[in-house]
Image (cartoon, grey):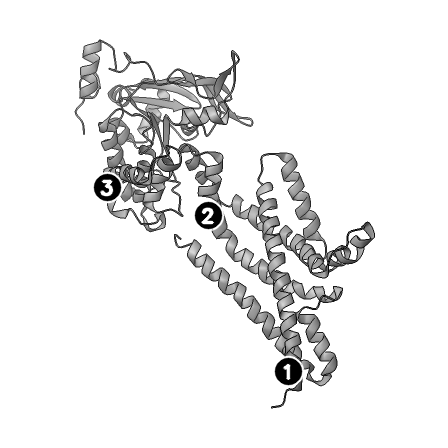
Amino acid sequence: MNLPWLESLPLLVDGLLITVQVAVLSSVVALALAAAAGLARTSRYAAIRGLAGTYVEIFRACSLLVLLFWVYFALPFLGIELSKVTAAVLAIGLNIGAYGAEIVRSSLKAIPEGQHEAGIALNLSPNERMLRIILPQAVARMLPPFGNLLIELLKSTSLVYFITLSDLTYEAMVIRNNYYTWTPHIFGSLLIIYFLLSSCIFITFRLLERKLTAWR
Amino acid sequence: MIAEAENGLKPEREEAAEQTGLPNGYTHLVPIVRYRSIQKSFGELQVIKGIDLDIYPGEKIALIGPSGSGKTTLGRMLMTLEEPSSGTITIEDEPLWQMEKKGNLVRASEKHLHRMRSKVGMVFQHFNLFPHMTVLRNVTLAPRSVLRLAKEEAEERAVEMLRKVGLENKLHEYPAKLSGGQKQRVAIARALVMQPKVMVFDEVTSALDPELVGEVLNVIKDIAEDGNMAMLLITHEMEFAREVADRIVFGAEGRIVEQGTPVELFENPQSDRLKSFLQRFR
């Protein structure tokens, strides 16, 4: 079978690298924000709880595409000019991080009060209680929802097409312009590539979960 | 059952009572714990309405009474899980919930509570084992991170305690693999390894299947016979209370209604409240 559009495969590989780069970097930002805001929401200081709560409510509610436009097109008017990759990582990280913070908070809250009390009865300090008793159990609970969230994040990276960052989707559109009649093949391949990338995340989290919940 | 003397004292207490000429063989000692005018409210609901209670070193007290009488709250206050609304608790003559600061008594800091807590241990109704740790790690966690023992020493002590509760063959199991009775015995070993001077047992058999109650109570009896640790046993097991306790304290509606030796209380209850309570266990 003759597949002329495959000559443009190197373009697709370039796009793939950008997609992976954006996904990995924004995952790091999202996880860091999720951990910080999620922990902050269980703080005993109302100001810290309030601050984290405001972050979650604002960034969870706003459309990722509009946020992306705002970071990339509006910030320059305030004198802040970001590269396309930085803008994408920031927008996606802020948005997904807000969802992640809720996962962190609810997982921490789901640990029974008796676990805290047993820690007190054994005279562990508040930090040791958090580090040795609460967090290990909470992290085990966080894994499945975080796996979902990171797959969601991966798929949302295709929105960077709209700020003309040359990711996988963008390159596929370029190739389609040149090989219009092969559109089903090109988009079909695109779907398969996203599926394979998602599988990597899914499998990683499955393995992590198996390892971290051996005690169940 | 342990034989009881005429006055209802355990034989070794009988001896102490004869030597000291004091009624229960303990009162010549200085109490290790004193509750004074303790009240506790949760919102509108007052669960403890003024309680005074002394616990002597090595004494085994069984706290009995209907549900909602504040028994558990009394134990939880000693473990610093619940703060009294008013009144004072002292351990070895030092206030638990207050500390001295520039001549005034102020609310205890975390540091003060940390120091005081080392004298108290607690076993919970629902075990509260750490599910993500093996049996051995459950028991070595506190010796290692609180007492800062080396791994080998902590494990040596832990194994000794686990042997005492009959679980030295389960060291590397996770709690999920254990029966309720085994879990509770691990929890007992975990509290014992810290060598508290007073231990609170909060309805430790209430969550167990009936056929598993015996193994846990037997372990507690062994510990009680070992000795020097004072025990506050919050329980609904009347037979057990009678066998183990030096003194029975009957509480109802947030007050202590009656107290005395097991024989005094069970054979000759004075108050109508206790009489009707005991009727349900006959």
Q: Is residue B110 above or below residue A183?
A: above
Q: Position of residue A209 (x, y in %)?
A: 46, 57
At x 35%, y 49%, the residue is B174
Which kind of residue does numbered mark 3 sit on?
Gly
Nearer to the camera, A65 or B37: A65
* Residue labelled with disc 2: A137
Q: Nearer the viewer, residue A19 or A104?
A: A19
Residue B114 position by quadrant? top left
Q: Residue B124's quadrant in the figure? A: top left
Location of the N terminus of chain A (image quadrant): bottom right
Measuring 39% from the left and 40% from the top, which residue is drawn there?
A: B126
Provide the secondary structure element on which disc 3 rests.
loop
Q: Tell me the subunit letter for badge 1.
A: A
The percent position of residue B164, horizontal first and vertical second, equals 24, 37
Q: Residue furthest toward the top?
A: B21
Q: Chain of mark 2?
A: A
Name the secondary structure under disc 2: helix
Q: Is residue A44 above or below residue B229?
A: below
Q: CA distance from mark 3 to mark 2?
A: 28 Å
* Residue neighbourhood size for the residue with mark 3, other residues' Cα within 10 Å, grouped as few (<14), some (14–19), many (≥20): some
Q: Which residue is disc 3 drawn over?
A: B166
- Is residue B205 in view from this perspective? no
* Image depth: mark 3 or mark 2 in front: 2
**Which mark, by number, is residue A6?**
1
The amino acid sitting under disc 1 is Leu
Of pointers 1 and 2, the one earlier in the residue sequence: 1
Q: Image check: B64 left or right of B240? A: right
